[in-house]
C-alpha cells in the first residue's frame, strides 16, 4: 500500500486518538491472570493488541468484544491457563512476545511463539536469559535469543534480583509477570526508568509493588483481582499530530483524554525546549494520568536529547527527527542505540528516508545528528515495514514541497488503523490518501 501526501494548508480541529498500546496489552494480559472478570474500555483495536488477545484465547482465556474498544476478559486466575495446541503468533508485536514469555515462564506446559519477519529479527535473549535464571526452559534460534522459541515454564519460579543492561519496559515487565509465579520477591533495576504501566496496573489488580528510583520490586504471593480499566489515549499516536501541527502553517490541534504518565511524556518536554506551542490542560489523575494536549504552528529550533530522557520518548524519536529536520539549527540524539532493534533499525531507516526528502542526517552508532532548516522536497520514501516510520514519513510529507509517496504503509495497522482518516479530518480536503 502506498500513501500519497501533499502539503496542506493547516491542520485544525479536535481529534480523539485510540487507546494506549502499552496499556491495552497489559490490560488484556493482567485481566487474563486475575480472579474474576476485567472490563476494559478504550482498548486499542490494532493488529498488535489483537495479537495479544488472540494468544490469550489460545491459552484458554475467554475474551468477549462488547463494542468498539470494549472487552470483557474472564480471568483464568494464576493457575488457570491451558497449554496452547498451536504456535502463538505474535505478528509484529514485541510487547506481545516479551510479556507473554514472562507469563509463560510460570506455566507448567510448553508453548511455542513466533512472529513476522521483523519480530523474528529482534532480540529476545534480554528476556529469556533472566527467565531461564528463574527456572524456565527456553529453546529456539540463536540459543534462545530469537523467535521462534519454545518455552516450558516451572512452578514455582525462583526469586530474582536482576540488573537489566537496557532500559526496557518489556524486559522489566516480563520479569515482573514471571514474578507472579515465583517463590520469593523479584526486583529489576534499570539503567534509566522505563514506562511504568505494568507496575501501576499490577497495583490496580491488588499486587504489592514497590518502586524506588530505577528499581522496582514485586512481593511474592497474593492474587490478582479483576476490575474495570479505562485505557487512556495513546501519547505515541498523538505525537504525530503534535509534530504535524507544529510544522504545518495555520495549524491548531486539540486532543483530549491522552495518557500523560511522566514516563511517557519526554516528547512534550523536548518539543517545548524546541520552541513548540504544546500544552497539557485538564489533567486528570488516576491509575494512569491523562490530559488534553494542544499544539499549534511554531518556529522550532534544534536541541540535544540523550540520557534518561531517551526511554521517555523512545517511540517518538522517528517523528521527533522529522521535527528536527524542519527546525532551525542542529539536533543531536544520543544514548538511543535501542532504536536499532525496534520494528526496523530506526537509526538507519530514518537517515536513509529523511535524506531522500532533502534532510541532512548523520547516522551515529547510538543516535543521529540532524542539521535542520534544509528545504524538504517531496520524494518516494518507504517505511521498511515499520508503522512509526510510515506515520513519521507521512508527517514529513505534509511539511515538504510537492508530492511525497510513502511506500509500504499497510504496517500502520499494527498500531493505528485510523491514522489516515483522523489526519484527513483535520483538513478541508484530504492531504494523505491511499493510492487507488
Ligand atoms: C513498550 C516498551 C518499549 C516501546 C514499545 C512498547 C511496552 O520497548 O518501544 O513500543 O509496552 O513495554 P522496550 O521495552 O523494548 O524499550
Image: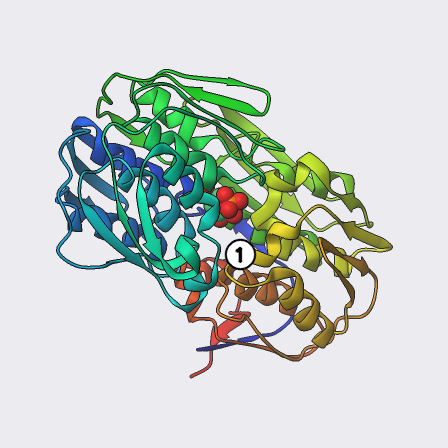
| Image quarter in which the C terminus is found | bottom left
Q: Residue sitting at 28 percent across and 45 percent down?
A: 69
**How many numbered marks, from 0 up?**
1
Q: Is residue 255 above or below residue 371?
A: above
- Local secondary structure at mark 1: loop
The residue positioned 33% from the left and 48% from the top of the image is 138
Q: Position of residue 233 (x, y in %)?
A: 44, 41
Give the x, y percent position of residue 116. 37, 66
| Residue at 44%, 60% in the rendered image | 142
Question: Which residue in the structure is indicated by mark 1?
Answer: 342
**Side (left or right) of 84 relative to 9:** left
Give the camera-side residue of 213 and 286.
Answer: 213
In x, y percent, where is residue 59?
17, 46
Mark 1: is the Cβ under 8 angstroms from ligand 1?
A: yes
Residue shown at the point (73%, 76%) measured from the top left: 377
Front residue of 397 and 359: 359
> Would residue 333 be found to the left or right of residue 397 on screen?
right
The residue most toward the right is 329
The residue at the far bottom in this view is 436
From what the image shows, is residue 133 above or below residue 413? above
Q: Dot 1 surroundings within 10 Å: few (below 14), some, or many (20 or more)?
A: many
User: Residue 151: image x %, image y %?
Assistant: 28, 48
- Quadrant containing the N terminus is bottom left
Amino acid at each position: 500500500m502506498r500513501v500519497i501526501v501533499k502539503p496542506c494548508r493547516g491542520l485544525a480541529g479536535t481529534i480523539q486518538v485510540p487507546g494506549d498500546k502499552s496499556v491495552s496489552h497489559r490490560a488484556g494480559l493482567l485481566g487474563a491472570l486475575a480472579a474474576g472478570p476485567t472490563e476494559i474500555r478504550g482498548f486499542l483495536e490494532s493488529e498488535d493488541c489483537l495479537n495479544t488477545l488472540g494468544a490469550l484465547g489460545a491459552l484458554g482465556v475467554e475474551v468477549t468484544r462488547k463494542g468498539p474498544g470494549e472487552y470483557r476478559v474472564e480471568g483464568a486466575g494464576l493457575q488457570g491457563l491451558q497449554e496452547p495446541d498451536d504456535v502463538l503468533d505474535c505478528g509484529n508485536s514485541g510487547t506481545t512476545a516479551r510479556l507473554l514469555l514472562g507469563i509463560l515462564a510460570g506455566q507448567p506446559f510448553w508453548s511455542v511463539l513466533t512472529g513476522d519477519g521483523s519480530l523474528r529479527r529482534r532480540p529476545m535473549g534480554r528476556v529469556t536469559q533472566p527467565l531461564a535464571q528463574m527456572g524456565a526452559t527456553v529453546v529456539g534460534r540463536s540459543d534462545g535469543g530469537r523467535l521462534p522459541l519454545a518455552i516450558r515454564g516451572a512452578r514455582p519460579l525462583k526469586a530474582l534480583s536482576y540488573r537489566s543492561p537496557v532500559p526496557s519496559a518489556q524486559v522489566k515487565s516480563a520479569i515482573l509477570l514471571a514474578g507472579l509465579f515465583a517463590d520469593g520477591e523479584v526486583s529489576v533495576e534499570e539503567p534509566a526508568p522505563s514506562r511504568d504501566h505494568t507496575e501501576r496496573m499490577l497495583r490496580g489488580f491488588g499486587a504489592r509493588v514497590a518502586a524506588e528510583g530505577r528499581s522496582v520490586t514485586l512481593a511474592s504471593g497474593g492474587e490478582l483481582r479483576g476490575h474495570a480499566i479505562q485505557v487512556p489515549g495513546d501519547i505515541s499516536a498523538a505525537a504525530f499530530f503534535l509534530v504535524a501541527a507544529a510544522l504545518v502553517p495555520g495549524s491548531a490541534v486539540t486532543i483530549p483524554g491522552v495518557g500523560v504518565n511522566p514516563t511517557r511524556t519526554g516528547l512534550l518536554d523536548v518539543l517545548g525546549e524546541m520552541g513548540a506551542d504544546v500544552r497539557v490542560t485538564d489533567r486528570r489523575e488516576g491509575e494512569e494520568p491523562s490530559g488534553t494536549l494542544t499544539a499549534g504552528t511554531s518556529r522550532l529550533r534544534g536541541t540535544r536529547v540523550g540520557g534518561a530522557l531517551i526511554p521517555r520518548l523512545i517511540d517518538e524519536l522517528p517523528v521527533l527527527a522529522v521535527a528536527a529536520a524542519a527546525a532551525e539549527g542542529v539536533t543531536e540524539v544520543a544514548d538511543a542505540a535501542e532504536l536499532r532493534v525496534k520494528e526496523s533499525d530506526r537509526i538507519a531507516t530514518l537517515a536513509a528516508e529523511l535524506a531522500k526528502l532533502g534532510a541532512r542526517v548523520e547516522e551515529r552508532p547510538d543516535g543521529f545528528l540532524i542539521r535542520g532548516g534544509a528545504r524538504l522536497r517531496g520524494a518516494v520514501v518507504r517505511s521498511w515495514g515499520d508503522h512509526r516510520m510510515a506515520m513519521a514519513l507521512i508527517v514529513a510529507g505534509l511539511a515538504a514541497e510537492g508530492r511525497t509517496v510513502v511506500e509500504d504503509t499497510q504496517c500502520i495497522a499494527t498500531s493505528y488503523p485510523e491514522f489516515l482518516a483522523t489526519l484527513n479530518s483535520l483538513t478541508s480536503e484530504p492531504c494523505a490518501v491511499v493510492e487507488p
